[in-house]
Image (tube, helix red, strand yellow):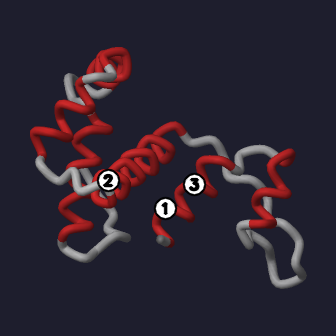
Amino acid sequence: MFVARQAVLELTYTAHDMAPFAQDMGYVDEAGTVKPPFTWDKERRLILRAKLDAVFFHLYGITDRDDIRYIYSTFPIVEREEKSAYGGKYRSCDLCLAYMNALAAGNPDAEIKL
């Protein structure tokens, strides 16, 4: 699945020592040279992780929103940190649920704005 592949590449290839991985993933320019690593962007990484979570929930048949909320609730430290940082919102859970809607609608590349 291309959505997962691209997200994994961007989450993983953040330093030059991962260039062989990026090359194996086909992240090269026209000359075959590995492109530069992705910049570490905390917000972008949160979005990509939520998108991956949605893909995996979908693949495992976990589509009930209450089940997804429960699974996210089992990460209390992440929940506490996000609620502190995002004005009481558990942003990764909210993003994941929004991406679940996008996947169900057949739009895996949707850009979610919360």
**Vertical side of 31 occupied by 21: above or below:** above
Q: Nearer the viewer, residue 86 or 7?
A: 7
Residue 12: give x, y in percent of width and height: 66, 47
Label 3 secondary element? helix
Q: Dot 1 corresponds to which residue? A: 4
**Vertical side of 109 occupied by 30: above or below:** below
Residue 37: give x, y in percent of width and height: 75, 53
The Cα–Cα distance between marks 3 and 2, rounded to whole angstroms, is: 13 Å
The reply, left or right, for residue 5 in relation to residue 1 is right
Q: Dot 3 corresponds to which residue? A: 8
Residue 25: give x, y in percent of width and height: 71, 67
Kindly identify the residue that appears in the image at 71 percent across and 51 percent down. 13
Kindly identify the residue that appears in the image at 80 percent across and 49 percent down. 18
Q: Dot 2 corresponds to which residue? A: 54
Please count the marks in the image.
Answer: 3
Label 1 secondary element? helix
The reply, left or right, for residue 5 in relation to residue 65 is right
Which residue is situated farthest in the bottom direction here? 30
**Vertical side of 32 occupied by 8: above or below:** above
